[in-house]
Amino acid sequence: MDLQNAQKVVDNWINNHGVRYFNELTNMAQLTEEVGEVARIISRRYGEQSEKESDKNKDLGEELADVLFVVLCLANQTSVNLQEAFDKKLQLKTNRDHNRHHSNEKLK
């Protein structure tokens, strides 16, 4: 599924199951909360902190999907076409960073 279709799926879900979108500020707070949950899993599972027993069954994919869902909500609410924005950003990064990353001694 591309991002444009994902935005439509989320919009349909909101309209059929979610009653309405939370306002943008609430969704920004939700996004921050969801990113925090991802950070907790990453820092404990892959970082130097020990993983608590209560965190061992947390699904990183599910938490990343939560982040994506809220990002799609925010895009819908603010009339951002994420597919266009992503394609444009990927092209910019490709043009700007290809040689820079290949010549970075730290990445070899």
Image (cartoon, helix red, strand yellow):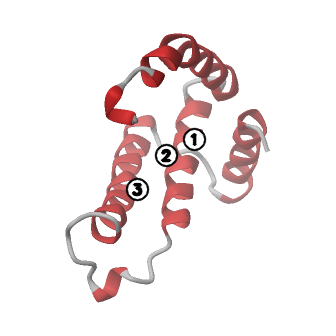
Which comes sooner in the sequence, label 2 or label 3? 2
- Give whichever of 95, 38 is nearer the camera: 95
Q: Which residue is mark 1?
A: 73
The residue at the point 79 percent across, 45 percent down is 1
Q: Check disc 1: other Cα within 10 Å, few if <14, some if 14-19, many if 20+.
A: many
Give left or right: position of 2 versus 37: right
| Cα–Cα gap, marks 1 and 3 | 13 Å
Tell me the CA gap for discs 2 and 3.
15 Å
> SS of the residue at dot 2?
loop
Which label was assigned to residue 22?
2
Mark 1 or mark 3: whose residue is earlier in sequence: 3
Name the residue rendered at 31%, 33% in the picture: 106
SS at mark 1? helix
Tell me whether the residue at label 2 lies in contact with that at label 1, contact meaning CB atoms closer than 8 angstroms: yes
Q: Choose top left, top right, bottom left or bottom right for residue 92.
A: top right
- Place residue 104 in its image quadrant: top left
Position in image of residue 54 (x %, y %): 32, 86
Q: Is residue 67 above or below residue 54?
A: above
Three-letter amino acid code of the residue under disc 3:
Glu
Image position of 33 with respect to 44: above or below: above
- Front tag of 1 and 3: 3
Mark 2 vs mark 1, foreground winner is 1
Type of residue at label 1?
Cys
Q: Which label belongs to residue 99? A: none
Rendered image quadrant of residue 76: top right
Residue for point 49% across, 45% down: 22
